[in-house]
Image (spheres, rainbow, N blue to C red):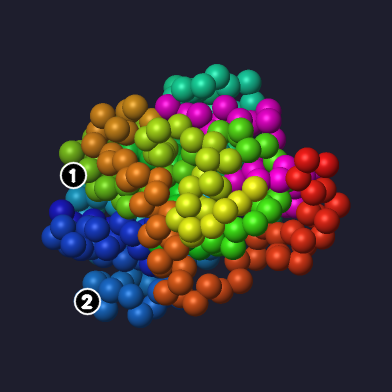
């Protein structure tokens, strides 16, 4: 298939591009040319900038499907659709589970759960108040224009090699260090993460099957908890750990920790995507592949979670059993 990726050179898009190329699709990349500039040397790269509405490079060309990974504001999708006109068959928008209302859900909540109110117009910062509502507006505009030729994919937290946010990488590293593990949360908290390779397989399956609608992309297949994930990281690292819950609130953006009122947002139903053919990489495989990739990049600072010194200070205030 001829597939245009709006993005494709950082994490999720890069994983999709790799799989599409491996499986024989004709891939074109659109971006500013800043991220992953040396990747995919044989793949056509169209240069533009969604922040400045620069889509001149999309004035020519035809594709069976566009996969939009870099749309965050309705203006982004609106101008991209203006530029592409009727030269693409299907518009697959990579949205987020942040589109859903965050509280008052029950386990197994699915694609028909209520969405947050759409936020239109410019926003200064994409944060918890603006990111999901702006994605709702993007979804609405793509569906309004492409109808049954629109596909919406709503991933939960994505994990895997190339991750550029690294919440799971934090726990993989922390498990490998062993010992007392400070957790500013509850080990029984449910956690959903989807392997980027499974997400890529779903995206490509949906465009090849020309399938419209909205799909949650969630994993792992067997429900898990934050405590179980941390213990799996320790097993992977061959260490012994003791999880020590410490009083909150957690530091901002602490990896994978959620307030209790939002726990059911970590128990979303993914049956529709599974029925469409999304694979289910075992959690242990995802963690092992993150660890190998992380080592290959030289374990750079993650910028999230506790530093070793911060964790030691927190633990000193709250020893196990205290
Ligand atoms: N990570 C998660 O856990 C998670 C969860 C749910 C949903 N998502 C969604 O996944 C998508 C992002 O995934 P990703 O970053 O891994 O995708 P990616 O496609 O691998 O990387 C982002 C791409 O967007 C391009 N880009 C960035 N700013 C741009 C601009 N102003 N104009 C044109 N191109 C631009 C970048 O290239 P240049 O820098 O060269 O322009 C890069 O190729 C987002 O839609 C996000 O909402 C992520």
Q: Residue at x 55, y 19 (%)?
A: 106
Q: Mark 1 = which residue? A: 208
Q: Which residue occupies the foreground of this view, 161 or 67?
A: 161
Q: Position of residue 61 (x, y in %)?
A: 22, 62
Q: Position of residue 288 (x, y in %)?
A: 40, 58
Circle 1 residues within 10 Å: few <14, some 14–19, many ≥20: some
Q: Residue at x 25, y 33 (%)?
A: 276
**Whether residue 67 is visible:** no
Q: Mark 2 = which residue? A: 42
Magenta span dominant secondary structure: loop
Task: Give the structural element (helix, strand or loop) at label 2.
Answer: loop
Q: Position of residue 11 (x, y in %)?
A: 42, 61
Residue 180 lies left or right of residue 157; in this view the side is: right
Number of the label disc, if any, that sits on residue 81 = none
| Residues drawn in magenta | 243-269
Q: Position of residue 56 (x, y in %)?
A: 37, 67
């Amino acid at each position: 298939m001829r597939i245009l990726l709006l993005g494709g050179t950082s994490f999720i898009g890069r994983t999709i591009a790799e799989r599409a190329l491996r499986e024989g699709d004709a891939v074109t990349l659109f971006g500013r040319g800043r991220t992953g500039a040396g990747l995919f040397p044989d793949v056509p790269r169209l240069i533009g900038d969604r922040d400045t509405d620069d889509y001149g490079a999309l004035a020519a060309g035809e594709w069976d499907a566009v996969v939009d990974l870099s749309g965050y504001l309705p203006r982004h999708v609106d101008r991209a659709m203006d530029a592409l006109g009727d030269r693409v068959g299907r518009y697959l928008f990579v949205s987020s589970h942040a589109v859903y209302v965050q509280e008052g859900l029950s386990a197994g909540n699915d694609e028909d759960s209520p969405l947050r109110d759409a936020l239109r117009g410019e926003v200064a910062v994409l944060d918890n108040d603006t990111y999901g509502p702006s994605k709702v507006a993007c979804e609405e505009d793509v569906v309004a224009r492409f109808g049954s030729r629109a596909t919406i994919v709503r991933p939960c937290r994505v994990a895997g090699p190339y991750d550029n946010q690294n919440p799971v990488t934090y726990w993989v590293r922390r498990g490998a260090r062993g010992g007392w593990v400070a957790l500013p949360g509850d080990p029984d908290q449910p956690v959903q993460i989807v392997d980027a390779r499974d997400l890529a397989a779903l995206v490509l399956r949906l465009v090849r099957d020309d399938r419209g609608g909205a799909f949650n992309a969630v994993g792992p297949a067997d429900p898990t908890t934050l405590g179980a994930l941390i213990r799996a990281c320790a097993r992977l690292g061959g260490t012994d750990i003791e999880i020590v819950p410490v009083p909150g609130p957690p530091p901002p953006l602490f990896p994978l920790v959620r307030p209790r009122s939002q726990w059911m947002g970590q128990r979303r139903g993914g049956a529709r995507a599974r029925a469409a053919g999304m694979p289910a990489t075992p959690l242990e495989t995802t963690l092992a592949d993150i660890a190998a990739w992380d080592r290959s990049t030289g374990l750079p600072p993650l910028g999230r979670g506790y530093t070793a010194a911060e964790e030691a200070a927190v633990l000193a205030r709250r020893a196990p059993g205290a």
